[in-house]
Amino acid sequence: MRVAAAILSLLVGLAAPAAAQEMGTVLPHNYVLSDILNRQRVEAAIGAPLDRPARQPAERAVPAAPGAAAATSYRPSPAVSARVRRHFASWMGGKVGAADAAKLAAVMEKTDPVRNWAQLVANDGLRTNDMADALTAYWILNWAMANTADNNRAQVLGVRAQVRAMLVANPAQLRMGEAQRQEFSEILILNFLIQHAAFDDAIRRGDRVLMQRLGDAAVARFQSEMGVDLRRLRLTDTGFAPAG
């Protein structure tokens, strides 16, 4: 996930590092990420408790059915995108100030954040208009920040299969309409872009202190919101597995 995009350099200039260290996962108020991704669901997906390695592959959760993509995909609406960006810019005002939040809103008006996100994740096999892909990218980015580690395409696709299985097993997610799925996905994409901009900038400048702060923030974010310790997970070609 290291492809350059125009919006990233602009986000770095809008105090993205400071915001990424402080921000939780910005979501619309009626979505609780912990209901979709939490320790219980993660353990079911990886097939073992997080405090010890999986004993045998057979313990792994059954992959989602072939038609599961229909339960996580959506047809994008410009009106939903506009609402998501207004919400995100408003929330960011509390982190970077009203002036920088206004600049961010202007950037999002002139560019297409979803297209920029797609450029960043395309080589990993992720695509737009699907909740599973958006959540996969966000989870792996935070894991990478927490562990100062990289990933490959097979690992990303393995996590996507795990994420899709978690989503389609969740009754609350299955009740979401297309507009809700789009809203959830696109606001995760905006979170991803801010955090990716900060982390990529820290790597390019060799700022190990900032890299550590961003990694610690990712750990705290997932621990408090989802009950998942990112440093107790390792990434494999079949997705996440318990570290150890």
Image (cartoon, rainbow, N blue to C red):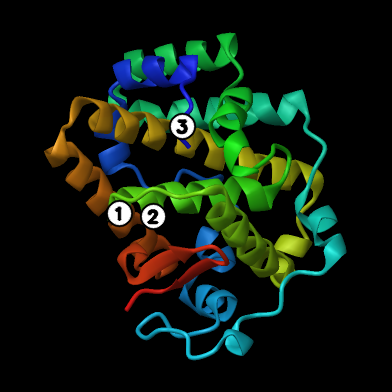
Mark 1, residue position? 146
Closest to the camera, between mark 2 and mark 3, is 2
**Local crowd at mark 3 within 10 Å, few (<14), some, or many (≥20)?**
many
| Contact flag, marks 2 and 1 (Cβ < 8 Å) | yes
Closest to the camera, between mark 1 and mark 3, is 1
- From the viewer's perspective, is residue 205 above or below residue 1? above
Asked if residue 31 can be seen in this view, the reply is no
| Contact flag, marks 1 and 3 (Cβ < 8 Å) | no
Mark 2, residue position? 143
**Secondary element at image label 1:** helix
x and y percentages locating residue 89 in the rendered image: 47, 25
**Secondary element at image label 2:** helix
Q: Amino acid at mark 1?
A: Ala
Mark 3, residue position? 193
Q: Which quadrant is the C terminus positioned in?
A: bottom left
- From the viewer's perspective, is residue 85 above or below residue 157? above
Give the CA separation, mark 2 to mark 3.
Answer: 15 Å
First reached walking from the N terminus: tag 2 or tag 3: 2
Q: Is residue 42 left or right of residue 194?
A: right
Q: Is residue 175 left or right of residue 32?
A: right
**Local crowd at mark 1 within 10 Å, few (<14), some, or many (≥20)?**
many
Outermost residue, left side: 209
* Res 98 label: none
Q: How many marks?
A: 3
Q: Amino acid at mark 3?
A: Leu
Quarter of the image for residue 167 reads bottom right
Q: Amino acid at mark 2?
A: Trp
**Secondary element at image label 3:** helix
Q: Could you tell me which residue is drawn at 44 percent across and 17 percent down?
A: 104
**Local crowd at mark 2 within 10 Å, few (<14), some, or many (≥20)?**
many
First reached walking from the N terminus: tag 1 or tag 3: 1
